[in-house]
Image: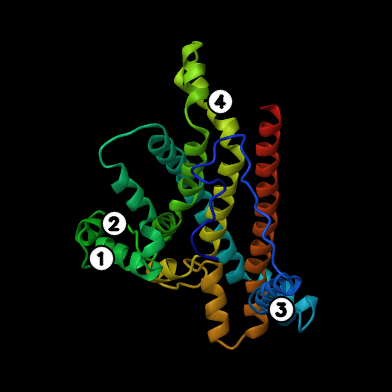
Amino acid sequence: MSGAPATVAAPAQRRGELPQQTNVLEPAWVKAALIAVALLFLTLFLFVPLVAVFTEALKKGWETYLTAISEEDARAAIKLTLITASIAVPLNLVFGVAASWCIAKFEFRGKSLLLTLIDLPFSVSPVISGLIYVLLFGAQGWFGPWLQAHDIKILFAVPGIVLATIFVTFPFVARELIPLMQAQGSEEEEAAIVLGASGWQTFFRVTLPNIKWGLLYGVILCNARAMGEFGAVSVVSGHIRGETNTVPLQVEILYNEYNFAAAFAVASLLALLALVTLALKSFIAWRLHEDYAGADNEH
């Protein structure tokens, strides 16, 4: 469940304007062929794997399935995954709003560098990002001796898992909000300030209502990636059963132990998360379209 998020609004599109659609006159067979290729692709790479996961998970019956996901190590993995996401997502929410506000509303030296740094986790392998934290906080790392002297544990513990997750997920909220805020411009905020609103009043009463669906869109993608992250977390976790294993790591351990029924049962939780994320994304995209259509009708 990784990858760069899709933007919810084109940067050049102003609030209240709908993208223009051009009718392309093509033979009917071209349209049918393109639809068939798209459906075939979705079937092979999306629907078939999802069906296979749930089929294997329930192959030995509901009793085996429920036992697998309620087993002590599985519950510990689920708990750690939820804790990690509950810390990483709010922090990325704050960062994403602050960064997008700064980039979309102000001009300053180093703006392009900030945009590049925000995109950095998209171009760096999650495994490499995990190794960076090993270099920093490992026993032989830059801060390792100091951490050991003060009995502070980051690697092979919850703090390391949270830090790695924050790194790989922090672009998601910002990258959804930056084009949306740029498209909306600053006219409404400037009008609110002229009328006597404070900075916080302007944000909560003008800016936040305008970006609420884009913000939720980014949070959903960030949460899905946080819960499904494997590479970076695998490097810093230490794979301690019942302590530092998240759900993806638990699936790997069960699969390597040839406990396929339990592995697919736990994996089905991630598959359900993917389906819920897809449904929520579709709903939010529809609401964004409705908002733009409503604003266009008002104008």
- SS for tag 1? helix
- SS for tag 2? loop
State the CA–CA distance, disc 1 to disc 4: 44 Å
Disc 1 and disc 3 in contact, CB within 8 angstroms: no
Q: Earlier in the sequence, mark 4 or mark 3?
A: 3
> Could one spot residue 87 in this view of the protein?
no
Q: Earlier in the sequence, mark 1 or mark 3?
A: 3
112 or 97, which is in the foreground?
112
25 or 270, which is in the foreground?
25
Q: Which mark is residue 151?
A: 2
Q: Residue type at mark 4?
A: Val
Q: Earlier in the sequence, mark 2 or mark 3?
A: 3
- Name the residue that disc number 4 marks: 206
| Image position of 3 with respect to 89: above or below | below
Assess disc 4: are there few (<14), some (14-19) or many (≥20) residues with their C-alpha within 10 Å of its C-alpha: some
Disc 2 and disc 3 in contact, CB within 8 angstroms: no
- Name the residue that disc number 1 marks: 135
Extreme residue in the top direction = 196
